[in-house]
Image (spheres, rainbow, N blue to C red):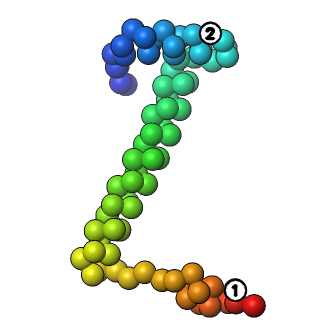
Amino acid sequence: MLAIRLPNDIEKRLADLAKTTGRTKTFYVREAILEYLDDLEDIYLAEKRLGSHYAGKSRTFTIDEVERDLGLVD
């Protein structure tokens, strides 16, 4: 269980959206958190991979190399 406090203007926007659409405020809060978590996880993974690349622990591939290795070259 999680309880959060929102600024009044955000709470009103959320309540208005819920009322307009017939969904609950909880539905929209859950959706927003899930979307944001997906984005954060992607950002942290990208930063980790970039750090590995700069540290020389990984390498990059050109699009030509990827196409060739996957047998996509015409």
Q: Quadrant of the C terminus?
A: bottom right
Task: Please identify the residue farthest to the right as the structure is shown.
Answer: 74
Residue 28: quadrant of the picture: top right
- Mark 2 or 1: the one toward you: 1
* Residue drawn at (43%, 54%) of the image: 42
Pinpoint residue 2: horizontal percent, then vertical percent. 35, 24
Could you say whether the residue bearing mark 1 is in a helix, strand or loop? Answer: loop
Could you say whether the residue bearing mark 2 is in a helix, strand or loop? Answer: helix
Q: How many marks?
A: 2
Vertical position of residue 26 compared to residue 69: above or below: above
Q: Classify mark 1: residues with Cα within 10 Å, few (<14), some (14-19) or many (20+).
A: few
Label ID, residue 21: none
- Residue, disc 1: 72
Q: Quadrant of the N terminus?
A: top left
Judge from the rendering whether residue 51 lies leftward or rightward of residue 20; answer left or right: left
Judge from the rendering whether residue 31 lies leftward or rightward of residue 40; answer left or right: right
- Residue, disc 2: 19
* Residue drawn at (55%, 88%) of the image: 65
Task: Please identify the residue farthest to the left as the structure is shown.
Answer: 55
- Residue type (three-letter) at the residue carrying disc 2: Lys
* Residue drawn at (33%, 61%) of the image: 47
Sequence-wise, which precedes: disc 2 or disc 1?
Answer: 2
* Residue drawn at (43%, 81%) of the image: 60
- Residue type (three-letter) at the residue carrying disc 1: Leu
Q: Nearer the viewer, residue 64 or 28?
A: 64
Gap in Å between the C-alphas at discs 2 and 1? 51 Å
Vertical position of residue 71 compared to residue 48: above or below: below
Q: Nearer the viewer, residue 63 or 2?
A: 63
Pinpoint residue 20: horizontal percent, then vertical percent. 66, 12
Pinpoint residue 17: horizontal percent, then vertical percent. 59, 15
Residue 57: quadrant of the picture: bottom left
